[in-house]
Amino acid sequence: MLVFTMSLPVVTFLLTYAISLSMGLMQYPFYFLSVSIEAKPASCFGSFGLSLTCLVAPVLAFVRSKNVEKLALDVPDKVKSDRALLLNERALKCAILAGLGGHGVASFQSKSEVPECGDAKWIVGVHLLWAGLFFGCGCLYCFISHRIDRLVPDLGTPGERKARAMFAYGTVAQFFLLMFVLPGLYMAVGAGTNDDGTVDCSSGGCWVIVVMSGFEITLLVTFMSTYVTFLEEFRGMQLVLNVLHTDRAWSLHERDHSVMQQTAGVEIPGSAADVNYT
């Protein structure tokens, strides 16, 4: 599942960029991720791949949070242990919100003009809000994962911990550049628009937009690469869905009640033969 989560967005955007560039759906200087998925047929592949990624990634974050919780409880320093548990909870919330933001980006494409309903600039506004949630919470998840490493020394290998530190500081720097420095530089150069609505590149504003497009791509790669560093922790793990009934101590996963009784340490009424699973 971890390999699938990391390879899916890569394959998705390679495909959407290839389709959009070959069909002339992307125009200089706008090479943003969102532009590559705003027109059909690229939007079909982009929405499907991005939504599926944002569904699976929070599940992986949940599995990882349980491993962090187990190791954090073993930290001798109570202050560090409690701090790690708090950060672990916040990291999971960030992963869930980032997934929600990704679904919003996939659902609200960034085109401001839709032939069926005319001018729809509000869609661009909603798209940007979802994008901010996606990138902001994704970067926070990456950085909090590094903060947890400093409190729980047994998480991952030394190489993975160094990689998480590099990704954490890399996301912070790129996010700051993308959200504040480059937009400010774009406004400073005084880039305007032509009569047909296209960007006037005579002032040099176009190269700023190209750089912003590049940073958006590398920012996605950087914070998603944090999941790769969980590989060693996930070895030997299996995700199992266990459905428990609310008024009886039986489970659809553990059909043998003797096993349930031993593992849960509770007295289970009746025997396995008394339960009808049909």
Image (tube, helix red, strand yellow):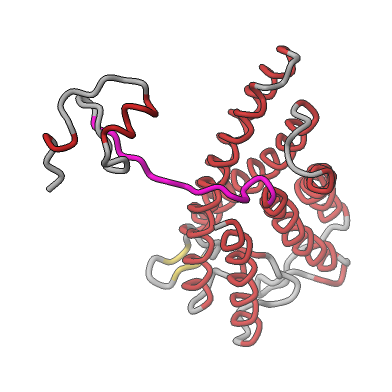
- Closer to the camera in the image, 64 or 198: 64
x, y percent for residue 202: 86, 72
Residue 172 seen in the figure: no
Which residue is depicted at the point 66% across and 45% down?
A: 233
- Closer to the camera in the image, 248 or 202: 248
8 displayed left or right of 51: right
Looking at the picture, does residue 25 appear above or below residue 145? below
Which residues, given as a range, are shown in magenta?
A: 232-245
Image quadrant assignment for residue 3: bottom right
Looking at the picture, does residue 200 appear above or below residue 96? below
x, y percent for residue 75: 72, 21
Which residue is depicted at the point 53% across and 61% down?
A: 50
Principal secondary structure, stretch drawn in magenta: loop
Residue 169 is one of the magenta-drawn residues: no
Which residue is depicted at the point 51% across and 53% down?
A: 56
In the rendered image, the residue lying farthest to the bottom is: 22
Looking at the picture, does residue 167 appear above or below residue 267? below
Residue 236 is one of the magenta-drawn residues: yes
In the rendered image, the residue lying farthest to the top is: 78
x, y percent for residue 265: 36, 21
- Closer to the camera in the image, 259 or 95: 259
x, y percent for residue 60: 55, 47
94 displayed left or right of 162: left
